[in-house]
Image: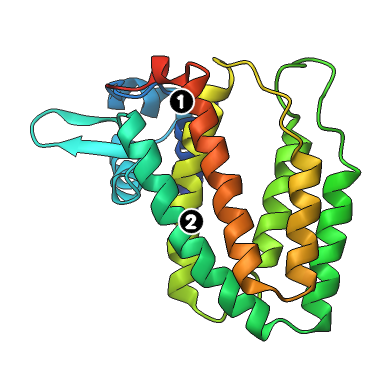
Amino acid sequence: MTIIKSPLGVIETVYQHMRVRLVTGQLRPGEKLKISQISQDMNVSTGVLREALTRLSAENLVVATPQRGFSVAPMSAAELMDITRVRIDIEGLCIRRSLSLGDIEWESAVVGAYHRLMHTPARDGHRQALPSAAWYGAHNHFHDTIVSACDSPWLLKLREQLQVQGERYRLIAASMIHHDERDLDDEHKHLLDAVTSRNADLTVELIGAHFLQTAEGLQERGAEIWLDK
């Protein structure tokens, strides 16, 4: 891949490219990152790549070890559950503020995001075992829209960081497991009803169950093959 060099955007471009590779599992957990090879493949300097990796290490996607360089952050079943529990707590705080502050435009956006999700094909023609990329995009948009009226930038920033970590586990493990017959449409419909009725307690309860069931499913169906025990 060739990265177009620009004085202001090259580090950001490399950062975003590497971030996608890390979150989607193109780079395996624990894998040592060969700086010279990667920088050559991307047609950027090693200094630019190191700067991007330093940013990614602050997000716990990369581990920087003195005298040993950079490696992909490891994964573990225990960390997955810890991320999930903290994510539920932060998501709950965002939801409560969003439901309290959201106006009619926000509510309309939530309903629109739900309809987009319901009308996005869950499977593509190539990987029937996995939901399509378009479905995942619509799914994340629906959840993002629910919390979009939250007025705390720090809560939303923490939420995004935890969401990325959760996505990393889900995407890396997804290709290793068989999906069950979980009725996600029904879960999302109940979630929409709770949101539009401004029932914060029920919404938080539903989102907690939604996240926890996903995490437990990854463990129960053999995703721990990918994880350090």
Q: Is residue 50 left or right of residue 142?
A: left
- The residue depicted at 44 percent of the width and 61 percent of the height is 89
* Horizontal side, residue 58 vs residue 195: left or right: left
Counting from the top left corner in percent of width and height, residue 202 is at 65, 65
Q: Amino acid at mark 1?
A: Gln
Q: Residues within 10 Å of mark 2 (few under 14, many from 20)?
A: many
**Could you give the CA–CA distance between mark 2 and mark 1, rounded to whole angstroms?**
18 Å
Residue at position x 81%, y 53% from top?
A: 189
Pointer 1 residue = 219
Residue 70 horizontal/vertical position (percent):
24, 32
Q: Nearer the viewer, residue 27 or 188?
A: 188
Residue 78 horizontal/vertical position (percent): 31, 35
Quadrant hosting residue 35: top left
Residue type for callout 2: Ile
Q: Residues within 10 Å of mark 1 (few under 14, many from 20)?
A: some
Q: Is residue 9 above or below residue 131?
A: below
> Which residue: 39% across, 40% down?
81
User: Image check: 189 left or right of 224?
Assistant: right
Q: Measuring 43% from the left and 73% from the top, which residue is drawn there?
A: 154
Q: Quadrant of the N terminus?
A: top right
Image position of 84 with respect to 128: above or below: below
The residue indicated by pointer 2 is 88
Name the outermost residue toward the left: 67
